[in-house]
Amino acid sequence: MTTSTLLPTVLTPTGDPAPVILAVLNSLTTSHPPETYLRITEHRPDGGAKLWHAWTEGGQPLGNKVDEHALTVGLDAADWLHICDLHGERNSRGRFDTEAFPLRAVLASVQTGERCPDDRRAGVQRFLNAAARHVGRAPAPGVPRWLGVGPALLTGKAP
């Protein structure tokens, strides 16, 4: 007969929150279906925030495909806001706010030509103009390009 002796695990505080944060991020990611893009905001105790991007299984290549198509047809940041609002689901868990975007639905909206309504687009432009003036810059015409739901565009390594 085999016996085993389990030694009690000693938990030693290290002051390093990284393992706990990664465990929470993993838990948040695995609780969503495949082909989902997650934008997770971690609210820090010092009042700051950190933005995390995560994708469930199949989400990275599909997100890149959505972005390539959106850029090809000339969608911009106002369209991105509108389409993401149509499909996004938001929830909070402790210090983490999660926005989940089912990428098949986002792709369908991009492919069918969904665009931001004119009144909302004008509001986005007013906001951008006010932000530019606030930092002492002249407002630029137009709205910036599509912001992205895939890793290539979100990490600055877009084609």
Image: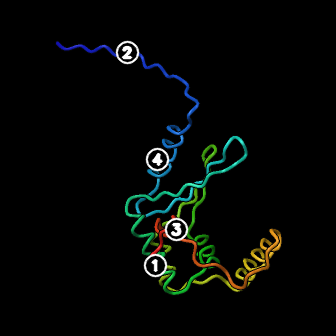
x and y, in percent, of residue 101 in the image: 52, 65
Q: Earlier in the sequence, mark 3 or mark 2?
A: 2
The residue tagged 1 is 68
What amino acid is found at the position of numbered circle 3 in the picture? Answer: Gly
Q: Residues within 10 Å of mark 1 (few under 14, many from 20)?
A: some
The residue tagged 4 is 26
The residue tagged 3 is 156
**Mark 2: which secondary structure?**
loop
Q: Earlier in the sequence, mark 3 or mark 4?
A: 4
What amino acid is found at the position of numbered circle 1 in the picture? Answer: Glu
Quarter placement of the N terminus = top left
**Is the C-beta separation of discs 3 and 1 under 8 Å?**
no
Mark 3–mark 2 distance (CA, rounded to whole Å) = 48 Å
Mark 1–mark 4 distance (CA, rounded to whole Å) = 27 Å
> Residue 88 shows which numbered tag?
none
Mark 3–mark 4 distance (CA, rounded to whole Å) = 23 Å
Q: Quadrant of residue 35?
A: bottom left
What amino acid is found at the position of numbered circle 2 in the picture? Answer: Leu
Q: Earlier in the sequence, mark 2 or mark 1?
A: 2
What amino acid is found at the position of numbered circle 4 in the picture? Answer: Asn
Q: Earlier in the sequence, mark 3 or mark 1?
A: 1
Q: Is 148 displayed left or right of 136 in the figure? A: left
Mark 2–mark 1 distance (CA, rounded to whole Å) = 54 Å
x and y, in percent, of residue 61 in the image: 39, 68
Mark 3–mark 1 distance (CA, rounded to whole Å) = 13 Å
Nearer the observer: mark 3 or 2; the answer is: 3
